[in-house]
Image (cartoon, helix red, strand yellow):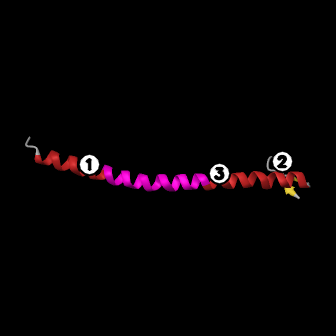
Amino acid sequence: MAELAAVGKFHVVDDVEADAVIEDSTHAIMHNEALGRAIRNMYGRLQVLEKQVASLKTQIEASKQSVPQ
């Protein structure tokens, strides 16, 4: 038995529907893993960029202070 999400009622799940759900979830898991890897890779790069931006801001502030007004 499975609940129909849109209807909120239960119905009997046959083998074809169960196989389709398993097949879909297999693909979804692969996509989720790929997206997870991409996000983890981007996160590391974003941390590096944040440090570079902070360094540049520090350099800009230091150069502003060293320039006579």
Viewer-nearest of discs 1 and 3: 3
Residue labelled with disc 3 = 31
Where is residue 36, by image quadrant? bottom right
Which image quadrant: the C terminus? Answer: top left
Viewer-nearest of discs 1 and 2: 1
Q: CA distance from mark 2 to mark 3?
A: 28 Å
Decide if residue 13 is in sight here: no
Please give the count of numbered marks on the rendered protein: 3
Q: Which residues are magenta?
A: 34-53
Tell me the SS state at disc 2: loop
Residue labelled with disc 2 = 7
In the displayed orientation, state which residue is furthest to the left. Answer: 68
In the displayed orientation, state which residue is furthest to the top. Answer: 69
Where in the figure is residue 55, as x and y percent of width and height?
A: 27, 52
Sequence-wise first label, 2 or 3? 2
Residue labelled with disc 1 = 57
Q: Residue at x 62, y 56 (%)?
A: 33
Q: Is residue 44 left or right of residue 53?
A: right
